[in-house]
Amino acid sequence: MKILITGTAGFIGSHLSKRLLKEGYHVIGIDNINDYYDPKLKNDRLEWINHENLTFIKASLEDRQKINEIFIEYKPNVVINLAAQAGVRYSLENPHAYIDSNIVGFTNILEACRHNKVEQLIYASSSSVYGANTSLPFSVHDNVDHPISLYAATKKANELMAHTYSHLYGLPTTGLRFFTVYGPWGRPDMALFLFTKAILNGEPIKIFNNGNMMRDFTFVDDIVESIYRLVLRKPEPNMSWSGNEPDPGTSYAPYKVYNIGNNSPVMLMDFVSAIEEKLVIKAKKEFLPLQAGDVPETYANVDDLIRDIGFKPQTSIKDGISQFINWYKEYYGV
């Protein structure tokens, strides 16, 4: 089976590619290696996953002609779209980057899937779509019509666009709402990377909302295992779906959305304590108010995921942080 993965040089994309290559799949990888963060890290990830069954192509999702050419030439069976302009806070500064990549780029992927008889599209959504929701844990069956950042709005738009293609063209689409993913080869703009780097350099770490934050931190291997199992599970229409009482998480079309989270939220200060314990260094802390676009709590209901693929993310914060810090020290020669 040929699987096309966008964002192959990214954090989740590189881990997923390595797993699928190990399992014998042929992976066609696409990434534009942009400079949102250090391109060297992205290129090093590509070296890490290098394999005879990996075909890598440097391209942007916004390049419609190039994307079409790739689909026509390689004829992927399954497409996993992980490429996106990431980051809630950056969306406040550079909104156009999110429209270009997450809306225009995703449209190009949908169209390419439609015209090239792709068997299934799996795509990254985000826990940020829950926005102003306060009912915990967050469920895919909840209404999510109140995003509080442009990043979240683009991810919600992706889900709506995917549903439209599932309805119009029968394209099976599976959306994955990731909850605060962390682990080795992680993104430098994420909390664990920022905290580890600052603590090792003797610099203060920024604690937003004065530490009153709770996150459902999810280890990258658990994300990868979930996607791996979903590759062979196309979404089926929900025959009991009703337009009178519409269920946002399923559809009469071949469309499904899943939360992928640890289902075990952690207080931010406990997360910091686990980093301090592993590093054996006490962090200097700068307490700040909640940032625009951020939510104070995330907590994933993963009942649908467990029911459908028989797997629940379960890596503990202690184990996950330890693996990240071991990688960080080796990679940066600390």
Image: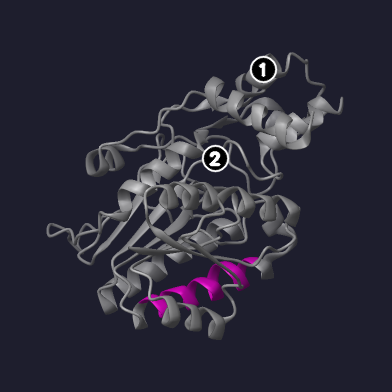
Give x and y (percent) for residue 144: 42, 53
- Amino acid carrying mark 2 in the image: Thr
Pointer 1 residue: 278
The label shown at residue 167 is none
Q: Main secondary structure of the magenta part?
A: helix
Residue at 55%, 58% in the rendered image: 8
Looking at the rendering, the stretch of residues picked out in magenta corresponds to: 98-113
Q: Residues within 10 Å of mark 1 (few under 14, many from 20)?
A: some
Front residue (pair 292, 235): 235
104 in magenta: yes
Cα gap from disc 1 to disc 2, whole angstroms: 20 Å
Identify residue type, mark 1: Lys
Image position of 218 with respect to 278: above or below: below
**Residue identified by numbered label 2:** 180
- Mark 1 or mark 2: name the one nearer the start of the chain: 2
Q: Residue at x 31, y 47 (%)?
A: 229
Q: Which residue lies most toward the right here?
A: 202
Circle 1 — which element? helix
